[in-house]
Image (cartoon, rainbow, N blue to C red):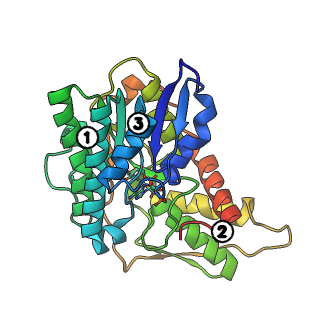
Amino acid sequence: MKNKEKVVLITGGSGLVGSAIKALQSNYPNFFFYFPSSQLYNLTEQSDVRNMFDKLMPDYVVHCAAKVGGIQLNLNEPAEQFTQNILMNTFMIDEAHRIGVKKFIAFSSVCALPDLPDGYSADENYLHLGPPPTPHYSYAMAKRMVDVQLEAYKKQYGFQGCSIIPTNIFGPNDNYNLINGHVVPCLIHKFHNAWKDRTEVEIWGDGSPKREFIYSQDLAKICLDLLSKDEEMPQRLIIPGQEYSIKEIVDKIKQIYDFDVYKRPDDIWNINVNYNTSKPNGQMRRKTESLYFNELFPNFEYTDINLALKESVKWFNLNFPNVRL
Ligand code: NDP
């Protein structure tokens, strides 16, 4: 480690966001990174978190570790989702403050924002203005507490923390579980199965609901650029994604499976998609709007969604079945 380097601790380095940061390390030569694993330090144990900070003494922290899942996990394991996330965040922020960390980034979630009627978009000031959506309640409340803790530590100690509120993240090293995963990894896994078994893909609803999506590498870049900037970080920051309907995302993944990645020249079979309209669509639109993002990152160039999806499919195919399923 050279003297000019800032020591950056990344937790959750094996996960979706942490591994994307790992992939970008060489673009940030002024940072010296540590990616300790959960085997080395279990962040729900205060003594482990304390030992980790005493040993690594980071200047900056990006705290990606969390117990994360889609709607089913949030419904089925609300107690674990609450307690594990609350413990990790509480110990991480407290120990970071104790050793004098200069910048601390943690993750909240778009599902921590209150449910708004269709057509309304939420900015950072909406975070505590109403309960989060019922299926996500305990996970979402644990995520909201990141913001409460950071604000308290800023007021009392001047601690510089930012809680990032990302939209739907996807990319390599995602959780591709069909029940507990998020939209994009679930779709990729479904298409993979349909392609392998020559079956169809079933989608709940008619595909018209819209969601925002962000590629993990774009989010990783935003986090590291935030650490690199001289100015103070906002205390909470929504990271807007690119908005598409579920059907648009389905069509793009279908295109990759039908034509780009797997197609043999002699193969005329294409995957059929069955929109099961007897199942609910869910909320039609969940749009975010950031008060700070455009000022901090004017004209941010998102990775082309087709390319990002193709990279994710490629990664899944290359690593299957040794992926999180
Ligand atoms: P992942 O599920 O991909 O990764 C979670 C990471 O946390 C893994 O590396 C895991 O390590 C680590 N971890 C879990 N429990 C512990 C523990 N007790 N001690 C130490 N490490 C632990 O998460 P993402 O990268 O998807 O999420 C990053 C952040 O972004 C999270 O805070 C999440 O809530 C938030 N977020 C994610 C969204 C998404 O769409 N994925 C959307 C909005 C917010 P191991 O594998 O060894 O268990």
Judging from the image, what secondary structure is the residue with disc 1 in? Answer: helix
> In the image, is the residue at mark 3 within 8 Å of ligand 1 by its beta carbon?
no
Q: Where is residue 128 in the image (x, y as percent from the top left)?
A: 16, 45
Tell me the residue at 61%/42% (across/down): 23
Image depth: mark 2 or mark 1 in front = 1
Q: Earlier in the sequence, mark 2 or mark 1?
A: 1
Q: In the image, what residue type sits under mark 2?
A: Phe
Mark number displayed over residue 320 = 2
What label does residue 201 carry, if any? Answer: none
User: Rounded to the nearest whole Å, what is the CA distance between mark 2 and mark 1?
Assistant: 38 Å
Left or right: where 102 falls relative to 6: left
Q: Looking at the image, is 173 positioned above or below residue 79?
A: above
Q: In which quarter of the image is ligand 1?
A: bottom left
Q: Badge 2: few (under 14), some or many (20 or more) residues near its Cα, within 10 Å?
A: few
Which is in the foreground here, disc 2 or disc 3?
A: 3
Question: Which residue is labeled 3 in the image?
Answer: 61
Which tag, 2 or 3, sits closer to the chain's start?
Answer: 3
Q: Residues within 10 Å of mark 1 (few under 14, many from 20)?
A: some
Q: Nearer the viewer, mark 1 or mark 3?
A: 1
Quadrant of residue 26 within the rendered picture: top right
Give the labeled residue for mark 1.
94
Which residue is rendered at x = 35% and y = 70% of the image?
73
Q: Residues within 10 Å of mark 3 (few under 14, many from 20)?
A: many
Mark 1 belongs to which amino acid? Answer: Asp
Amino acid marked by disc 3: Val
Q: Is residue 266 above or below residue 50?
A: below
Q: Do the residues labelled 2 and 1 touch (CB within 8 Å)?
A: no
Tell me which corner region of the image, top left, top right, bottom left or bottom right, holds residue 288: top left
